[in-house]
Image: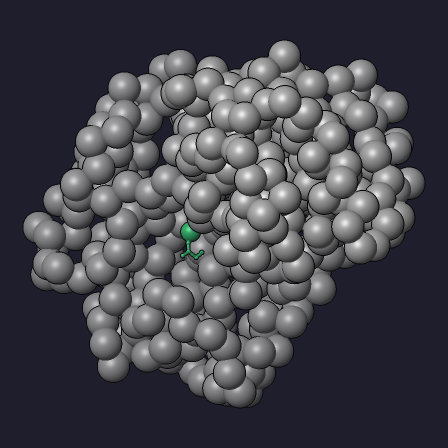
Amino acid sequence: MKARVEKVFRHLDPKPDALLVANSVDPHLDQTFFYLFSVPSGLFEGSVAIAHPDGKLDVLTSPLEAESAHQAAKRDAHVTVHEVGRGDETEKLVKKLVGSARALALNYREITHEWYSRFAQFLPEAKWSDASNAIRSARVTKDADEIALLRKAGEIGSAVGREIPSLLKSGMTELELAAEMEYRMNRLGAGGRSFSTIVAFGAHGAEPHYQPAATPLRSGDSIVCDFGAIYGRYASDITRSYHFGKRDEEMQRVHETVEKAQAAALAAVRPGVPGKEIHLAAQRVIDSSPWKGRLIHGVGHSIGLVVHDGWGYNSTVEDPLEEGMAITVEPGIYLPGHGGVRIEDDIVVTKNGFDFLTTAPRAYLEVPA
Ligand code: GLY
Ligand code: MN
């Protein structure tokens, strides 16, 4: 997309003659390829995109995705698709398209060493530069098309979040609940999950990145569900915490404290506010409760073509929020051996504050066992 290519070039300093984005084999795909080339379907393993300062984009694709690539190029006059076969065809064509250009930029953060070695070998006179910070800066604020996709991804996650209480049954396992959630996201239009779904029962909720297992649900468990849908390549990320059967009073107060921490963080969101202020607003609420020190991660991150989209905010981040940033706000309290509560929503920063992209209820809920 011309506007996105130009946006990346605006952030590049010094300006290269071209930016080369190279995909390896899944999962080593640089999502910047799909940022620059808006194509809804296809893996594009081994594909290369060459972005030019005038907004034009050359896309080299294998026959596997050629149909999707040609269709997408029909909608974007600035894209030229080149179908390449196996062997050294890609290298020959990249060399031809680069021509006499010498100042070439790469996304050092994503390119594989194998690709870099190949480029260095067949473009021996190139002067390479690192485009990764410019790419991150461009991608971190979203355009209207991206926000529409993020909103839809958020709606799918929210719909499943609303359904979870009705899915809970004594004895079901974390894996069963995760499977049910993913199935429902797909039925609602998701192309997959944003990341490996987290379902944590009881004490497992104390570990933020716990992976579900065959643990059965028991009356008295707290439940942390952290999940997200991919829609049109864009991710959502939502966490809701529930309580199955009568939970002890501590967990109810923990839940209410996390809700307050999230509300405090959200109240601080507006363009120009240093990222750390959002984190500190949540941390102040938690640290003035009996669970001081139990927020054990940064309170959020940028979200987009990947769930962790290159920018996060913790107690040290000075970089300010900008209008159009899509971020998560996800405080939690974690009590080892006992359980945890996290509440996470996706928002987009607006001129005067923010809009929610996710909406499922957040309040303490005891689901009858
Ligand atoms: N949803 C997982 C995470 O943000 O780390
Ligand atoms: Mn998250």
Q: Nearer the viewer, residue 178 or 143?
A: 143
Residue at (80%, 16%) from the top-left corner?
77
> Which quadrant, please, contains the N terminus?
top right
Q: How is the image coloured?
A: one colour
Q: In this image, 136 relative to 4: left or right?
A: left
Q: Position of residue 142 (x, y in %)?
A: 52, 26
> Against 252, is 369 above or below?
below
Residue at (26%, 33%) from the top-left corner?
275
| Residue 29 visible within the image | no
Q: Position of residue 189 (x, y in %)?
A: 75, 48
Q: Quadrant of residue 147?
A: top right
Q: Where is residue 255 in the image (x, y as percent from the top left)?
A: 30, 58
Q: Which of 233 and 82 is in front in this view?
A: 82
Q: Position of residue 15 (x, y in %)?
A: 46, 18
Q: Which of 207 and 184 is in front in this view?
A: 207
What count of labels does the image hold? 0
| Residue 219 visible within the image | yes
